Amino acid sequence: MAAPPPAPRTFLGRLSLPERTFVTDALRTETVGGMLLLVAAVAALVWANTFGGSYASVSDFHFGPAAIGLDLSVAHWAADGLLAVFFFVAGIELKRELVAGELRDPRAAALPVVAALCGMIMPALVYLVVTATGGGSTSGWAVPTATDIAFALAVLAVLGASLPSALRAFLLTLAVVDDLFAILIIAVFFTSDLNFAALGGAFAGLALFWLLLRKEVRGWYVYVPLALVVWGLMYNSGVHATIAGVAMGLMLRCHRREGEDHSPGEHIEHLVRPLSAGVAVPLFALFSAGVSVSGGALGDVFTQPETLGVVLGLVVGKAVGIFGGTWLTARFTKAELNGDLRWPDVFALATLAGIGFTVSLLIGELAFEDDASLMEEVKAAVLVGSVIAAVLAGILLKLRVRTYQALYEDEERDEDMSGVPDVYEQDDPAYHLRMAAIYEEKAAEHRRRARAAGASSDGDDSPA
């Protein structure tokens, strides 16, 4: 007898309970960080456009040990130092996704990986087409390729859109894969002349870091000083210093052993993520987003080929790339979309991914570091493109907000007060016994009220 055909795989289906818990905790922190990021970006714009002289003075103020090549400006420390913390968390996220998350299964990973890759290739192509047509510089092709998950989540919080966990997880996985490719772009295309002595020292430090982890040596006082040494050597090697953060994040163990509630990687991520989302990224935004927003400057965003390429890359390239990559992969892998969702939901999420703030600003600084004027204009284009993408995504998401709210409430419902959502307990006999007891108690209460109401009615009908 022939074996039955395998059941079609569901795309954007319900997450497992552990994965849902991890995604919920991670996105809660990122949402708070995203709100701080928005505040920092607005503060930078106000500061730079009202007291521009003081903003420039603070951003350009240098400090640090010059003897080891670390006499850097405040803005430089924010971009190379603080963002190393952000990329450290990104490295842990990537490692966890590869060993315990959505990316551990090659069949399931194909869809978000292809979607993220198409969501980076298409914006780069849009940028190159626009600049080639307009005679602009192609150096900024990588600027519109990045997605800012914190900024996107902050937009969702402002909109009050409670997305189902599957959509939130897909957005997080997209961002993780997006960060991976952004890291590769920075490492490959924005590495200056190499200092092989410093690079060798950085690799030696990373090897020691890995060895200490394998020997299960504990103590922040061991790893933090070593991490700072590795970061300093990586900076002086000519490779962008944030790569050190990624490398150390990838080395952490992110799979749980028997008896463990959390792996070491998950524990450290839980500790460091608030520092990344609440301090490192907002401070980077404060000293990177301060650009001129005069009418003339904003008008130039839509007339210069480099800036127009960034805006169209973020708004059009991201949406078309992610949606197209998702639809084609689902079509050829015979993955069926979750019956509660529709393809316009995927397009709305793809549009939201056009918010490319933190890493886009960083790549813009690296791509045009020899042209300060064009760098500022490209930064303005990142801000404009991100705002347009946020507005369009907000409109699309609002059209389905009632559906999302209903799905979200179904996922969160916990009528038996067990601490586990009811949708995850349908195969647990104890759950149904608890619910039976609850309903029996409610039925007894209603019978009591019925008797009381009947007695009251009889009393009212009795003759005076």
Image (cartoon, rainbow, N blue to C red):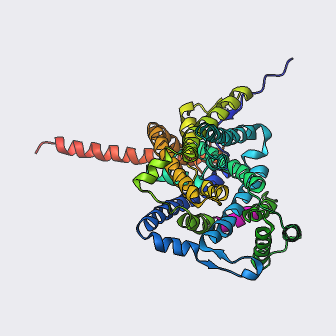
**Residue at 66%, 67% in the rendered image:** 272
Q: Which of the 4 image quarters holds residue 246?
A: bottom right
**Residue at 63%, 44% in the rendered image:** 170
Look at the image and tell me in which quarter the C terminus lies. Answer: top left
Near-viewer residue (137 or 238): 137
- Specify the farthest residue to the left: 464
Place of residue 291 in the rendered image (x, y in percent of width and height, measured from the top left)? 50, 60
| 202, above or below 305, in the image | below
- Specify the farthest residue to the top: 1
Is 244 on the left-hand or right-hand side of 215? left
- Specify the farthest residue to the front: 135
Place of residue 18 in the rendered image (x, y in percent of width and height, measured from the top left)? 68, 52
Which portion, as a residue range, is magenta? 263-273
| 103, above or below 58, in the image | above
**Residue at 59%, 42% in the rendered image:** 313
Place of residue 196 in the rendered image (x, y in percent of width and height, measured from the top left)? 87, 67
Is residue 13 among the parts visible in the rendering? no
Task: Answer whether residue 43 is magenta in the image.
Answer: no
Is residue 310 among the parts visible in the rendering? yes
Magenta segment, principal secondary structure? helix
Near-viewer residue (374 or 36): 374
Task: Answer whether residue 270 is magenta in the image.
Answer: yes
Place of residue 395 in the rendered image (x, y in percent of width and height, measured from the top left)? 44, 40
| 316, above or below 36, in the image | above
Look at the image and tell me in which quarter the N terminus lies. Answer: top right
